[in-house]
Image (cartoon, rainbow, N blue to C red):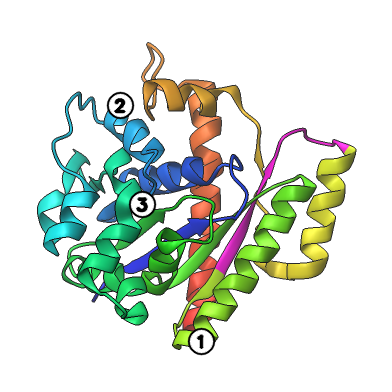
Amino acid sequence: MDGKVYVVGNFKGGVGKTKAVTMLAYEAATQFKDRTLVIDLDPQGNATRVLAKTGNIDNIDKSITDGFRVGNLENEVISIMPKLDLIPANTSFRNLTKVLFEKFPEDEISQISYLKELIKPLKGKYDRIYIDVPPTISDYSDNAMMAADYCIIVLQTQELSLDGAQTYIAYMQFLSEKYNAHLQVLGIIPMMLRQGGRVDTKVLDQAKEMYGNNVLGTIVNYQERLKVYDVEGIHVNRNISGTIEMWDGKAHQLFIDVLTELDEHERYLESI
């Protein structure tokens, strides 16, 4: 059975999309024991950097750019750790539009569906494929949405993030209708900067009013440990007794809970 493809997005930058992608992929591989692949579609390569540090990889000689140019992503996969792989991105991927136009001149459908075709040979090898994208309406988001089965939206509890989420959902629906894509919202992950903050609470309440049960009950609160993972890579430290260090345990449990909720949503959507 082919694995499912998830695009994680919001059309506002800096809301925690890459954090969600890398943490969900890490928990899927380590806790759920699922064969997991991260595809980095962002030329800034933030997910690539975090996962390279996670796997203690100093030199990356593969890239999604090469895969798009030759028409094969299978040769661009690197192993991060058992059950977790990555197709990395770098700044050369900023030329995606040029690559697509050269390959498919005057063929818009083929341009925006190219990633969907390139992923097909990979879907049988993985249980989960997560795509990280820049926060823009662009060839990156079009390709990711057309390739995905589900969309996971990251909502930082601030007004502009809610606007970005609304725009993202509206654009997803536009693509689905125009090109007959079968993409559904799997869930909206609330990321709260200040627990109990008036603006944060107001935005979260607005999101629940608008999107109901699509908004997860698990709230990812600001944690210093999650910022450490950006610098040092994702890890789990243990005490002398062998138990998981408290702050690592809290950070990972949050995303285990998020993943569990998303899986519950998926089972429901698959059943109707």
Percent from the top left, x then y, of residue 144?
40, 64
Q: Amino acid at mark 3?
A: Leu
Q: What amino acid type should be assigned to the residue bearing mark 2? A: Lys
Part of the protein shown in magenta: 186-197
Q: Residue at x 48, y 26 (%)?
A: 248
Cβ atoms under marks 1 and 3 closer than 8 Å: no
Return the mark for residue 53.
2
Is residue 166 toward the left or the right of residue 198 in the image?
left
Q: Position of residue 232 (x, y in %)?
A: 38, 21
> Vertically, is 130 above or below 267?
above
Instruction: Say which residue label 3 marks.
Output: 41
Which disc number belongs to residue 112? none
> What distance separates the C-alpha of mark 2 from that of mark 3?
18 Å
Which class describes the residues within 10 Å of circle 3: few (<14), some (14-19), or many (20+)? many
Vertical comparison of 222 with 29: above or below: above
Determine whether, in the image, residue 40 is placed left or right of residue 179: left
Residue 19 is covered by the magenta coloring: no
Circle 2 or circle 1, nearest the eye: 1
What residue is shown with label 1?
A: 178
Query: In terms of image quadrants, where is residue 123?
Result: bottom left
| Few, some or many residues within 10 Å of mark 1 (<14, 14–19, 20+) | few
Q: Earlier in the sequence, mark 2 or mark 1?
A: 2
- Secondary element type, mark 2: helix
Name the residue located 14 percent from the left edge and 64 percent from the top edge.
71
Q: Earlier in the sequence, mark 2 or mark 3?
A: 3
Spot occupied by residue 219 in the image (x, y as percentages of width and height): 67, 46
Q: Dot 1 lies on which element?
A: helix
- Which mark is first along the chain, 3 or 1? 3
Quadrant for the N terminus in the image: bottom left
Evaluate whether residue 260 shows in this view. yes
